Image: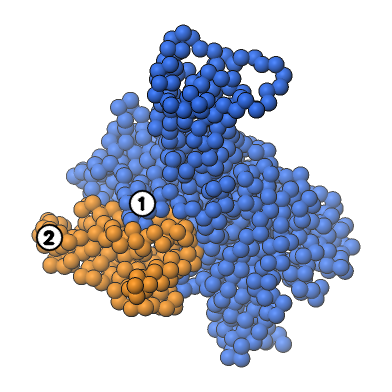
Amino acid sequence: MNINFWLNGVNRHAEIYPDTLLIDFLREQGCFSVKRGCETANCGLCTVLMDGRPVLSCSTLAARIEGKKIVTLEGMQREAQEFGSFLANEGAEQCGFCNPGFIMNVFAMLNELKDPTEDQIKEYLAGNLCRCSGFVSQTTSILKFLKYKKAQEEA
Amino acid sequence: MKYVNQPVRKTDAMSLVTGKPVYTDDLAPKDCLIVKILRSPHANAWVEDIKTGTAEKVAGIACILTYKDVPQKRFTLAGQTAPEMSPDDRLILDRHVRFVGDAVAIVAGETEAAVDKALKRIRVDYRVEAPVLDIHKAKDNPILVHPEDDWKLKIPLGGDNKRNLCASAVEEHGNVDEVLAKCKYTIERTYHTKANQQTMMETFRTACYMDHFGRLIVLSSTQIPFHVRRIVGRALDIPASKVRVIKPRIGGGFGAKQTSVSEIYPAIVTWKTGRPSKMIFSRYESMICSSPRHEMEITVRAGADENGIIKAIDVYTLSNTGAYGEHSSTTVGLSGHKSIGLYRHTEAYKFAFDVVYTNVQAAGAYRGYGATQGIFAVESAVNELAHKMGMDPVRVKELNMPVEGGPLPGYPDVPYAQSCSMDRCMARAKEMMDWDSKYPCRDMGNGKVRGVGVAMAMQGSSIAGVDVGGADIKLNEDGSYTLALGCTDMGTGCDTIMAQIAADCLNTPMDNIVVFSVDTDISPYDSGSYASATTYTTGVAVMKACEELKKKICKLGAEMMEVDERKVDFDGSCVFYDETIDISDGADKNAAGHMTDAEEGYRVDMDAISSEGAQKKVSLKDIALKGTFFNNIELQVVKQHSSPLSPPPFMVGMAEVEVDTETGSVEVLDYVAVVDCGTPINPNLARVQTEGGIAQGIGMALSEDIQYTDKGKVRNNSFMQYKIPTRQDIGNIRVAFESSYEKSGPFGAKSIGELVIDTPCPALAEAIYNATGVRLTELPMTPEKIAMGILKNKSEQ
């Protein structure tokens, strides 16, 4: 079947099988930041934005993106650099394998919640697993990033 | 020091946070055959007949391999220094399948759909036999997991496959029974720790292809590239020289990738077909047929005198290696050696163990490597003993803990505790937790009770007298350095840590050092990253290599300046002549300082381009450039390092939990970890290691459990049933360092990677006891067990 969609701002057409999963399709398109950590929609590694909302690409059919705007970390390199540097300063990236899905969900959270509290952050990101960091440094990075953004806005 | 002991960013951090394609599956050739495995539905069975004909007819199938197609020499998948301590008990495919999930056939095809279709068309007739599933009934059971005659233990460790025994031993110092008889307080308890999955976020995966020399290239997510080269060679029965292993970025390991779990399957496919292939383990496969922590049942007897001094400890460990023996004889050793050593006044101790085969998935290496299990048992026993004595467990530990210069009973790898600040760790933890006001518990008045618990831990730093670290440093034409390593950064940051060490040794900016790892054709030999060895062992190899490279730089600099090489020094950017340098006992002009006429001619040119040469000073850049033309002094050094010692890092963990006394649910409110890892080379990375280890330990303590049905099938085969902690489950983790200085380590460093998973199980067990009066001896400590314990206590009152 044929689909028409936007990937990282570029309008595209593709021919797919009806049962192709979005994660596999995106990796075929060269979006290697999209990672698979499980098959049961538990780990959050494959999170991408569909029309601005976070979805798990491992449990979304590629057919569902017809007419939609898909954004992966490849399409948010500037933002990834900016927020990612806060992770890097804490040593929070560790093995890095969960980073892209986690960072996409952080961006989704910042779209949705104006000034999230620590509890809201933990709740929003509960579906993003990480086995290296113990999460503490990730939370610290987000809080420091929020503070930096706030200072930027005020300036 | 500019970089050591500084929280510098990881050199690869920005690539990782921007999602660059740096992992195995991102880099695998695009035309790889997809490799999948047909797995046994039975825990113990023999393949009587296997028909692959109709499966082979599926369009796109490149090859299907069965037990008839693989070499018949047994090997082990354990990544250990040869001759491995693990028994040779595997074939790539065996007629005898020994657990639910064991490999029966390998299918490779051009698309995943074709492979899935072919898998369904393979017909297997099994002769199904009764499995051995109970660890208590495994030893001397008439059903043998490994009845074969070619089972081989290369190092005698008490194993006997005709008894389902993988290893067995007894160590005793003094007479435990006599000393215990004299003790005023004694305890005897049996603890049960379960198998756990490491669940690194990147599952096991390997891609293979042939190069133009007819060699097999293995691109793999592994902690042990050099061991993989040997293992693949042995498995395929080809010379290891035919195998080249490349390690890209690794998405976590935690010991799981210290076993060659995925490599052999695509390796044999590519070797047989000549075509590139890859095998990506699903999470399901990573749950049912990988290399989880050894389940152990540990019986502890301990005794103390009237003053709270621990006088005797007896540990007996029954370890379950599952269907194959990877890492089994070695992990079990740590359950005694790293636990008994925590009590310095122990006059007599005994440590005995049996490791048994059963028909469940094979165990392997997992952070802590047996110490985690042993420390849970011994720390729990001593905590309970403290309550018997009416003493605060912290006080008992203060009286008995390891001290610098003091003994570590039963720990063979240092003569005494050379570097130890356990006392400071305990004092700091007490203060951070506000222990004295929180111990033992606080009733919150709403059905919830808060309790605190404490545990100590120690680990090693490398395998003494075995592990080899390697470093290869060279000066490049532009004055930069390349540091090639064989250790494997699995997210821990060792590539960065080695660059920090090299930058300080060479007095150069870190970004002037390119780190490369790992390619077995290019990297210096290194055992790999495991056994808490990398910083301690490879770190010293880096220091040695830098020291020698500096000498070579000086030599070439002196030659360029035409001065005595003993009268020059190197400050990181220049080699300069210093006539004040003392050169006692008569001067032999060094051979390298002696130049031929032709070299003289070249050197004159050199002077012309180096304005500093005239001022008896020559820049690193000029030396580097000189290294590339008409030069006989190689500006490259390869060094190895092995330590005869394994100095333990130490730590104290304290937990505060809130238990709902009605439901038994536990919330971890606060976890304080104070660590003595020697000098933390990178305090950020050391802190995050600690936070990650504590979180992983909390999972082991409270929720993670690999359970089997009575037919031997794994019940927890996804993240739905195997629950690792999320960010909402771990509470507050606070980390502090109280460093000692370890003279045998780089800049005073010991290790940290494994130590940090050892305290949560005993500290949380103690906190739950203090909150509820329920003493749990089996992991995980689920709400159900706690609630039932509370009910039992009530009914007994």
Q: Nearer the viewer, mark 2 or mark 1?
A: 1
Indicate the chain on which mark 2 is placed. A
Q: Which residue is mark 2?
A: A11
Which is nearer the eye, B427 or A81?
A81
Residue B607: % across, % down: 43, 21
Does any portion of residue B796 appear in the rendered image?
A: yes
Residue B330 in percent (x, y) is at 62, 46
Q: Position of residue B733 (x, y in %)?
A: 55, 69
**Which residue: 58% across, 30% down?**
B569
Pinpoint the chain carrying mark 1: B
Amino acid carrying mark 2 in the image: Asn
Q: Colour of chain B?
A: blue
Chain A color in figure: orange
What residue sits 29% from the left and 33% below the top? B274
Three-letter residue code for mark 1: Ser
Number of numbered markers: 2
- Residue identifier under label 1: B15
Q: Residues within 10 Å of mark 1 (few under 14, many from 20)?
A: some
Disc 1 is placed on an element classified as helix
Have a look at marks 2 and 1 and say if they share a chain: no
Q: Nearer the viewer, residue B29 or B89?
A: B29
**Most extreme residue toward the front, as rendered?**
B615
User: Would you say B171 lies left or right of B204 here?
Assistant: right
Residue B100 appears in the picture as rendered: no
A17 left or right, relative to B607: left
* Residue found at the far top of this picture: B597
* Residue B584 relative to residue B540: left or right: right
Quadrant (top left, top right, bottom left, bottom right) of the C terminus of chain B = bottom right
* Display colour scheme: by chain
